[in-house]
Image: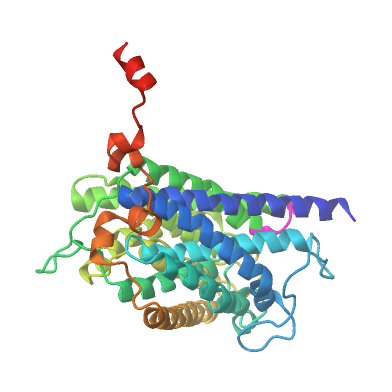
């Protein structure tokens, strides 16, 4: 066992820890961007469904993505992974397994952005199981596991398509079938802003995600040799910074005021945009990719609102459209020296070849994830006699209707229920 093997394995586990920590970022982001009557539900279902995604990945997901003797859809070995070493690896196979398991959980959490504030808990549970079985693993196998898109040279270093676009396509299916939240749209088609309850939580969530992305992208180098992970981390950080700046300024120009939620979404869009290309493009290109992602997210949020698609945490814009842009951008900016997968981009003499591969990849992956997710939810709608809680339950909030308790009991519960008055407590107050 060489020193390089050990260092690579440690780096991969550090990356996995950072990616799992991103779940905390999503909890704060989603809870802060929605109303406090649903905060406990959002936090709890995120942890629980991460558990489901992890068990399913261990049982069959890893085998479907990285298994041998595969067919067009999936691989067919390494099920119920036992921790054994796979021959030829320059790092611990178990470390790689944990790293990839964390990615599967992130894609599912992105998908759940389209369910927010109105879906039954039972829908979350069953969709988590099925998405982790037959949606995410198929797209991941096509691109990362040696499937047909990998054979064509599809460039997606850390998952703009595999993780983010796949999750966003599932979120789109959910938003269509679940329909908008109560009070979101008026009869004349105009939209009401259902404000999130805590912008500070949202900002902290974005910062946690930003830090976690160093594990997401730089960790995907799967090693420390030559310090290349530092270059990937630099591209990642600058793209996020550029996205935050461009989103803030475009909102300022168009709306007359610099909008904080737009700026936060711009930072995330920059991160999503650079995820596919972070190892394939020069640093100046990473800044351009982030800048464009920040502008795209501003306009796409308004477009979805115009179409009456209620996306509470902007998953479709941040992870969907930015995921498309990020993946396609490698077909423009990938350099001959860095394009270890596929061909150089259009701006480096590669012609339209790689751009075409990228366009086909995002189109097919998005369509597969959307169609299969739509079918899953359609089936669940029949089996569960509806995907959505009742209007009364939605109005009271999912904390109470689904769990019988509050994420913020001091706000919603009468004081007499929160702090029973005993003789001693009454006396102490009187003193």
Q: Nearer the viewer, residue 311 or 392?
A: 392
For this orientation, the residue located farthest to the right is 1
Where is residue 59 drawn, in percent x and y? 67, 72
Q: Residue furthest front?
A: 423
What span is in magenta?
220-226
Q: Quadrant of the N terminus?
A: bottom right
Looking at the picture, how far across and down is residue 360, in whole percent?
49, 82
In this rendering, would 259 be left or right of 122?
left
* Residue 79 appears in the picture as rendered: yes
- Residue 378 included in the magenta stretch of the image: no
Q: Quadrant of residue 155?
A: bottom right
Pinpoint residue 394: horizontal percent, then vertical percent.
27, 60
Q: Residue at x 27, y 72 (%)?
A: 179
Q: Nearer the viewer, residue 174 or 381?
A: 381
Q: Residue furthest left?
A: 188
Residue at the far bottom: name it: 71
In the foreground, 36 or 278? 36
In screen coordinates, is 50 left or right of 26? right
Across and down, in percent, residue 181 comes to: 25, 64
Question: Which color scheme did the rendering employ for the protein?
Answer: rainbow
Relative to residue 284, is residue 132 depicted above or below?
below
The image quarter containing residue 431 is top left
Residue 339 in view of the camera? no
């Amino acid at each position: 066992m060489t020193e390089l093997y050990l260092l690579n394995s440690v780096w991969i586990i550090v990356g996995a820890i950072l990616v799992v920590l991103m779940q905390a970022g999503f909890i704060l982001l989603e809870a802060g961007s929605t109303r406090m009557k649903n905060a406990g539900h959002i936090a709890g279902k995120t942890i629980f469904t991460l558990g489901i995604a992890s068990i399913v990945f261990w049982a069959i997901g890893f085998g479907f993505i990285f298994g041998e003797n595969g067919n067009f859809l999936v691989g067919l070995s390494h099920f119920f992974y036992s921790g054994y070493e796979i021959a030829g690896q320059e790092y611990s196979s178990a470390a790689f397994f944990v790293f990839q398991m964390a990615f599967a959980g992130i894609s599912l959490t992105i998908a759940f952005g389209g369910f927010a504030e109105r879906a039954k808990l039972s829908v979350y549970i069953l969709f988590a199981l099925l998405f982790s079985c037959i949606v995410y693993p198929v797209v991941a196998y096509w691109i990362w596991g040696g499937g047909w898109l990998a054979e064509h040279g599809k460039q997606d270093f850390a998952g703009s398509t595999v993780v983010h676009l796949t999750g966003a396509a599932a979120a789109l299916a959910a938003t269509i079938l679940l329909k908008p939240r109560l009070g979101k749209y008026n009869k004349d088609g105009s939209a009401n802003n259902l404000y999130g309850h805590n912008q500070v939580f949202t900002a902290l969530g974005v910062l946690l995600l930003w830090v976690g992305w160093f594990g997401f992208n730089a960790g995907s180098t799967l090693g420390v040799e030559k310090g290349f992970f530092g270059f990937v981390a630099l591209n990642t950080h600058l793209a996020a910074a550029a996205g935050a700046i461009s989103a803030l300024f475009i909102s300022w120009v168009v709306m007359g005021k610099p909008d904080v939620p737009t700026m936060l979404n711009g930072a995330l869009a920059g991160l999503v945009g650079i995820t596919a290309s972070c190892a394939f493009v020069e640093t100046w290109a990473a800044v351009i990719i982030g800048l464009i992602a920040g502008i795209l997210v501003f306009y796409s949020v308004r477009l979805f609102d115009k179409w009456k698609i209620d996306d509470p945490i902007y998953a479709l814009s941040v992870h969907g459209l930015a995921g498309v842009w990020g993946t396609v951008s490698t077909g423009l900016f990938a350099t001959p020296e860095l394009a270890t997968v596929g061909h150089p981009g259009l701006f480096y003499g590669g012609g339209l070849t790689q751009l075409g591969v990228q366009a086909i990849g995002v189109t097919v992956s998005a369509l597969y994830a959307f169609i299969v997710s739509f079918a899953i939810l359609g089936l669940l709608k029949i089996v569960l006699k509806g995907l959505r809680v009742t209007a009364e339950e939605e109005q009271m909030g999912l904390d109470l209707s689904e769990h019988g308790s509050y994420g913020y009991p001091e706000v919603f519960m009468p004081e007499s229920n929160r702090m029973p008055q005993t003789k001693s407590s009454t006396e102490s107050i009187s003193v």
